[in-house]
Amino acid sequence: MKNKKTIIIITATIFILLGTAPWMNKQATHDRVFNEKARIDGTINKKTGELVCDYSVNWFPFGRFVSSCEGGYFVPFFYLRKAKPDNFKAINDPSDWKTYRNEKYGFEFRYPNTLSAENYSGTEKGNIIIGVALSTQGTDFQIPFLELEIIPQSGKSLIDDSVERLTDTETYKGIVNKEINIGGLTGREIGNAGSVDTEYSVYREIVIRLKEKESLFIKYVGLEKETLDAILSTFKFTK
């Protein structure tokens, strides 16, 4: 009888633990779904690369339910967050990365070997002089992690537009509007930490004035901060 009671208690404890899955990290669960699904289900706009609506993570029996306005997914309790490998620092070491170089417009930067770079210009994506998009190899470059463009527009007008779109405190939280230095030039980084009903950093834009009517415009989403910082640290003008 005592053994039977012990078995019932152990079984109930295991059932409760599996049902609540307290080891599931909320941020890691969000990031897993974001990286796997956002560019597929429309959570990230396929044409502009901008976030449409972020995912929220909620408890669900034996796992978590992760949903945005475009899709919802059940992540089971046996999901375990992948730890960063011991060589994570090496992964973000630009010395072994590929180099993108544009001789015509005089700039270059390094980017991870796991990404591919595609050029676009003119009417392909609006009124731009030259653009390059970084995305996972084998995917449509119009759904990138990072876009870098030279645009025939003043830095001030681009900054004003970014501020108007991305810093509405009623819509977003964690507003970012700060000075940044890239390639020896100073500009502004504008963005937010997601909608007011979410808790994740998702989208940023960087504007660097090059000439009176010409600016460097960078948009990024879904990149780990360490990787983004490493990419930007390698950007330089070559002429």
Image (cartoon, rainbow, N blue to C red):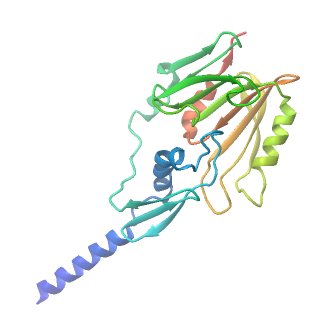
Residue placed at 46% from the left, 25% from the top? 113
Residue placed at 56% from the left, 31% from the top? 141
* Relative to 171, 95 lies left or right: left
Q: Residue furthest bottom?
A: 1
* Relative to 216, 224 lies left or right: left
Above or below residue 86? Residue 108 is above
Rendering quarter of residue 232? top right
Residue placed most toward the observer, 116 or 180: 116
Q: Residue furthest front?
A: 123
* Relative to 142, 72 lies left or right: left
* Relative to 121, 145 lies left or right: left
Point out residue 234 in the picture as x, y percentages from the top left corner. Answer: 61, 22
Above or below residue 73? Residue 142 is above
Rendering quarter of residue 211? top right
Above or below residue 143? Residue 78 is below
Residue placed most toward the observer, 4 or 111: 111
Point out residue 56 in the picture as x, y percentages from the top left corner. Answer: 55, 61
Point out residue 128 in the picture as x, y percentages from the top left corner. Answer: 75, 26
Quadrant (top left, top right, bottom left, bottom right) of the C terminus: top right
Residue placed most toward the observer, 59 or 139: 139
Quadrant (top left, top right, bottom left, bottom right) of the N terminus: bottom left
Point out residue 210 in the picture as x, y percentages from the top left corner. Answer: 81, 22
